[in-house]
Amino acid sequence: MIYTPEKYSIPDEKMKPFIDKNEILEILKRTESPTKELVREVIKKSLNKKRLSLEETSILINANSEELINEIKQGAKTLKEQVYGQRIVLFAPLYVGNLCINNCKYCGYKASNTSVKRVTLNEKELIKQVEALEDTGQKRLILVYGEHPKYDPEFIAKSVKTVYNVKKGNGEIRRVNINAAPLDIEGFRTVKKSEIGTYQIFQETYHIDTYNDVHISGIKSNFDWRLTSLDRAQEAGIDDVGIGALFGLYDWRFEVMGLVRHVNHFEAVYKVGPHTISFPRLQNASGLDIDKKHLVSDKDFTKLVAILRLAVPYTGMILTARESSKIRDEIMEFGISQIDGGTNIEMGGYTNESEEQELDNEQFQINDNRSLGEIIEELVEKEHIPSFCTACYRVGRTGEHFMEFSVPGFIKSYCQPNAILTMVEYLEDYAKPELKEKGYNMINKKLINYTDKKFKSKLLERIEKVKKGERDLYF
Ligand code: SAM
């Protein structure tokens, strides 16, 4: 029998903390050693595009035999293929400022770390970074800020507007997402006006004792203020939000449950889940001061990503350059929808001539140093369609992640053709000849699958227009 949706010990209400540590621990205990049948039933439910309850997620977490873990991974792979198709959205992070008043044991930018050079990009410097990113073909950025009074909502909004205004050649940034400290409702309103995409805030750990231990001082040490931050964003009209946990601070099983509980909270109160889930894994950082006992092995990491895919089938999943190219390639199959490419997280790093990234200048170490071009080439070789698409947000198809998921044919009619159109722009404007050839070969192969002649001719017409110099065409 599959467990029915849980009755939460803490009811879901707007802006009220919703994590009950004992409830999560009790469910994890109650579902220990599930039968094969039960695990298979849960996978089947997810393949029917149903979000899993906490109990069902916990059943997958507690499935420990190789056989069942392989079935979970296969399930995630099938779901990805059925729902999301072959496209992967690309973006780059851009650090705007690393001043910080918090002291978090895992973070290289903690206030007490005096070996870090503190930098806030001024307008001119920000423009230079964006131009350098546009020169490589980027169209989507996530701006990252430390937590500091200087980075108030007006500052954030102004930097977003600056980025949107930078146009170099055919380059432009069409979507600016944010990763910054939690704001109050007024603050979120101010930032919303600058037309941000997703506001992303990670809880880091949903386990309150660990949270209190690793966040020594600063505003971030208030668990509930952070936990309810995206509720305040919703109140301010930002319904496009990203959640995440920093894996390695506490038991990964608990964190997966925390993330799913966060999704449930959003669904219960706002009738919309988060747009994206992130699962950064703890990396080395300057002054890192962490108990290593909860570090997550590659094996568990792969399993947990597959479980998250199955638990929340409609949400975008982001895998960053914290992970090596090998892990990224392996895990991408299990339902990743977005990756960063050509990443440099040093302050001002995109115009830095030196190839070496220095730990003292970064928030943490990254493990995938491939350029955007190299990543695109590898995606193409594996028959993924790299995408810089930003169409839905700009034509007001909101809640688009639900559409991708629930509107039959949405991927085929919108996401895939738009991915192809942005790929053609990239091939024309930025690709080396060899990649251009490979890219067009891949596109031609994908075009064969379009059997609707009318639609195909529209798509071909737009491809030709892009080749002749028109830009920003989409369905
Ligand atoms: N100051 C903002 C905040 O506190 O939300 C920005 C944080 S930072 C750019 C984004 C994320 O990087 C953090 O939320 C955390 O999950 C992650 N991070 C911090 N230290 C890390 C480390 N040593 N290894 C991997 N990820 C880390």
Image: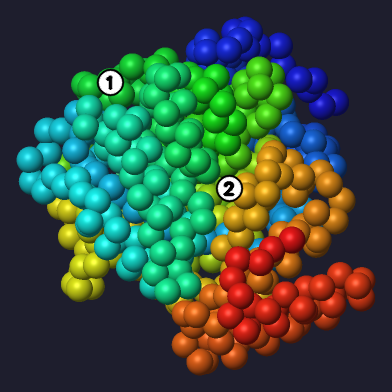
Residue shown at 66%/22% (left/top)?
Answer: 270
Q: Secondary structure at mark 2?
A: strand
Q: Secondary structure at mark 1?
A: helix
Residue beneath label 2, please?
Answer: 317
Count residues near mark 1 (Cα–Cα under 10 Å), then give few for <14, some for 14-19, many for 20+: some
Q: Nearer the viewer, residue 207 or 189?
A: 189
Residue beneath label 1, please?
Answer: 219
Look at the image and tell me in which quarter the C terminus lies.
bottom right
Is residue 394 at least partly visible in the picture?
yes
Q: Nearer the viewer, residue 37 or 85?
A: 85
Nearer the camera: disc 1 or disc 2: 1
First along the sequence among labels 1 and 2: 1
> Where does residue 394 sit, x and y in percent of width and height?
62, 49
Q: Is residue 423 above or below residue 187?
A: below
Image quadrant where residue 396 sits: top right
Counting labels gives 2
Residue type pointed to by label 2:
Met
Q: Is the C-beta of the residue carrying label 2 under 8 Å from the nearest atom of ligand 1?
A: no
Residue type pointed to by label 1:
Ile
> Where does residue 102 sit, x and y in percent of width and height?
22, 28
> Where does residue 110 sit, x and y in percent of width and height?
19, 36
Q: Is residue 320 above or below residue 186?
A: below
Q: Is residue 32 above or below residue 416?
A: above
> Where does residue 330 sit, x and y in percent of width and height?
56, 63
Is residue 256 at least partly visible in the picture?
no
Image quadrant where residue 23 sits: top right
Does 31 sit left or right of 164 as displayed?
Answer: right
Q: Nearer the viewer, residue 423 or 214?
A: 423
